[in-house]
Amino acid sequence: MIEFHLDGRSGLSPYQQLVQQVRHALRLGLLREGDQLPKVKDVVTDLAINPNTVLKAYRELEHEGLVAARPGVGTFVIATLGGTTLAALGPLRTDLRRWLTKARKAGLDDESIEALFLTTFRTATSEKLA
Amino acid sequence: MMALRAKGLGKKYKRKWALRNCTLDLGRGHVTGLVGPNGAGKSTLLNLASGMLEPTTGTIEVCDGVPGSGPAQLAKVGYVAQNTPVFAGLTVAEHLRLGAALNPGWDDALATARIGRIGLDPAQQAGKLSGGQRAQLALTLGIAKRPELLLLDEPVAALDPLARREFLADLMAAVVEHGLSVVLSSHLVADLERVCDHLVVLADSQVRVTGEVEELLATHHRLTGPRRDLDTLPADQQVVSASHTDRQTTVIVRTTAPILDPVWTVGQLTMEDLVLAYMSAPVPGRPALEVLR
């Protein structure tokens, strides 16, 4: 079982934070198939947050095929993140390191690199949307 | 099934409108946050919903009934007014007895348990309680009445951070367990961000924006870029607020479409940004004042 927390400075809404924390726990192996997510009522009273927020987060995770709700019992993990994605991480990281070295050689400082990455990332994301 | 439905609702005191042309639909089981500057009409709206005031114009329906129309309606709605009034001469225990006698759906077990947990002495006179304790007593009466809709006017203003968190947790537990609908006004946007799924921003006696919190946050963006004329923005981008320097334009827009123009740096808004943008934005239909720096 994991315990949720909310970060007021994360820039993410409470619902996004809950989804992210479950996915993070799945990636790190803190949650495995068959594990139960905290009961909605417990999350609500522990964090003093809106129950619809928790339900929405669980629905989203369900939609992604990561958890399944068993009526009257609770919500359980049915899939893991990682595995294949974990294997792909190594080469991607190497590529990114090479790119970073190139960027530094070209004279970019940390902030410029971050800005370049973010704008490119956003453009690519909005192209995908459009 | 609506918890609260207002159409063209207005309230005029002598010559001044406290609330104008208010149209709202708040569904059941939702927690709605009411924010706005002092004097924006928040308390007036809550008083209209509880039946303490009668509308000057328009209509309001609460839990499928007219506010203040009779005992059945009163039983459906709980109301904790601003400054959490209690009877100074009565003890805490007498308040609970009064609550049990006056409310058909009274949950005595819940009331007693809550008083015990908060650490209120049942024999204490309410007039001698601290501000925070008085608020807790009033809130206990509101929850134990087991209403369908609970109206709270600045409920946590007098509470310390721990008591505030515990109160909000209790409130949320009541929402889960009893399907309670809640409308609460507060200046503490960080609290509202946690507990509310719907938001109503009031300013200048009018509803400036209302909707589901997640949806509002997803459709509002802060765009920053080189200075430009706002008339050149796409028609689907509704400008909430804008400011310009000689070179830069910052604008908060509402749109359901993605922002495709590459000159903009797109930033997400927090609930606080959103509330402030609407509170300080010029009222539509009045000439906009452009800020030049």
Image (tube, coloured by chain):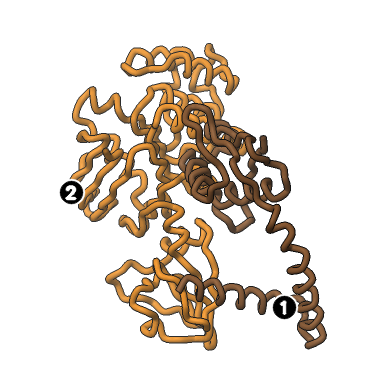
Q: Position of residue A52 (x, y in %)?
A: 46, 41
Q: Position of residue B134 (x, y in %)?
A: 50, 27
Position of A42 relative to B71 (above/below)? below
Amino acid at circle 1: Ile
Determine which of the numbered discs, if any, sits on residue A113 in the image.
1
Q: CA distance from mark 1 to mark 2?
A: 57 Å
- Considering depth in this image, is A100 or B293 the residue closer to the camera? A100
Judge from the rendering whether residue B227 lies leftward or rightward of residue B14; answer left or right: right
Residue with the mark numbered 2: B58
Measuring 79% from the left and 83% from the top, which residue is drawn there? A102
Q: Nearer the viewer, residue B116 or B224?
A: B224
Q: Residue at x 28, y 50 (%)?
A: B24
Left or right of B39 in this view: B171: right
Question: What hue does chain A carry in this figure?
Answer: brown
Is the N terminus of chain B in the top left, top right, bottom left or bottom right quadrant?
A: top left
Q: Quadrant of residue B61?
A: top left
The amino acid beneath tag 2 is Gly
Give the secondary structure at mark 2. strand
Specify the quadrant of the image occupied by residue B215. Answer: bottom left
Residue at image position (48%, 68%) is B221
Chain of the residue where label 2 is placed in the rendered structure: B
Q: Looking at the colours in the rendered structure, which chain would you say is drawn in orange?
A: B
Helix, strand or loop under label 1: helix
